[in-house]
Amino acid sequence: MTNVISLDFDFWMEMPESENYDWSMREVPFFLDHIWMIRAMDAFARGVDLREQCNLPKDEPSPVEFSQLLIDHKLKVRKDTVAISESHMVAYKWFSRLKDLHIIHIDAHHDFGYVEGMRELNCDNWVKYLVDKGKVKKITLIYPKWRLRQTNEWEGGGKESAEKLGVDVDVCYGLKESLPHNLKIRKMFICRSGAWVPPWMDKYFMNIIHNLMSRHENIMMYGWAGLEKVMRWKDPDVQWKEIKAQAAAIKKMMKKNAKLAS
C-alpha cells in the first residue's frame, strides 16, 4: 500500500460545545476571518474571552511537536512531497495520482461526506471522492481525544458513512497513541481549515510548517503566495484591542437600550 498522511489543523481546536455555540462554517473569506472578529466581540460583550474557549487541548501533543513525532514513530516522509493549503479539499488533488492508498487521516472530522447525495467535491467529502475513484485501500482515522468529551462524531454518523465507503477503516483517538510506526510516507498534506480554527491559533499552525521546513525545503503551497500570507492577523495584540473596544461599545449600547425599554 501507498502510505500518505493527511493532517487537518482543526485536530487541535476543541470546539467549546459546553457553551452551546451555534456556529456556521463555510470555506469562504467571511468565515475565514471576519466572522471570528464578530464572535470574539460578542463573547467579550458577554464577559467571555474566546482565547480561553478556543485554544489547544491539553491532552494532545502540541503542534510544535508534530515534526518530532514523525521522527519518534519512524515515519519517513519523502522529501519534496509535503503540501499545505487552507482547505482539506486540496488533499484530493495532492493524492489523486497515487493508488492503493493507506490514508493516515488526522482530523477532528471524518470527511467521508456529511450530506447524502452531495456531488460537488469539498472539504468534507474529499475522502469519499478518492474512494469512489478506486484510489483507497485503507484509512486510519485518528481523532483527537477531545472528541470523546463531546458528542461522538463517529457514533453519530461517521461509522455509518464509513460502512458505505466499502474500505477498511480503523478508528482511534489520540495522536501520540495512535500514530503508526515504521512506515514510508509517500506524501503528506496539511491544511489549516481556518473556518473552523480562529486566527489567534495561526501561530501554532506556523509552528508545524516551520519545523517541517527544516527537513522539507520545497513545501508545495496551494492558495498562498508565500508563508507571509498565511497569518490572518498581522498584529494580534492590535486586533484584540479593537475587539475589546468594540465589545465595550456594544455592551454600553445594550445597557442604554435596556434602560430605555424599562
Image (cartoon, rainbow, N blue to C red):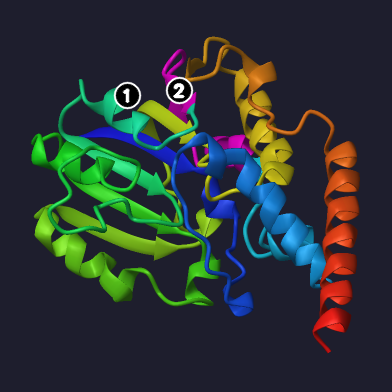
Q: Give residue 206's quadrant in the image.
A: top right
Say which residue appears at 31% left-offset and 75% top-offset. 156
Callout 2 amino acid = Ala
Residue placed most toward the observer, 187 or 253:
253
From this viewpoint, is residue 64 visible?
Answer: no
Residue visible at 30% across and 34% down in the picture:
3
User: Magenta residues?
Assistant: 66-84
Give the SS element for disc 2.
Answer: strand
Is residue 144 visible in the rendered image? The answer is yes
Depicted 255 relative to depicted 10: above or below: below
If the image is split into quadrants, where does the N terminus sit?
A: top left
Q: Secondary structure at mark 1?
A: helix
Which comes before the other along the chain, label 2 or label 1? 2
Residue depicted at x 20% and y 20%:
97
| Residue 18 placement (x, y as % from top left) | 61, 79
Residue 256 lies, in percent from the top left, at 89, 73
Q: Which residue is mark 1?
A: 94
Quadrant of residue 134 within the rendered picture: top left
Q: Which residue is mark 2?
A: 83
- Judge from the rendering whether residue 161 lies leftward or rightward of residue 45; answer left or right: left
| Kind of residue at disc 1 | Trp
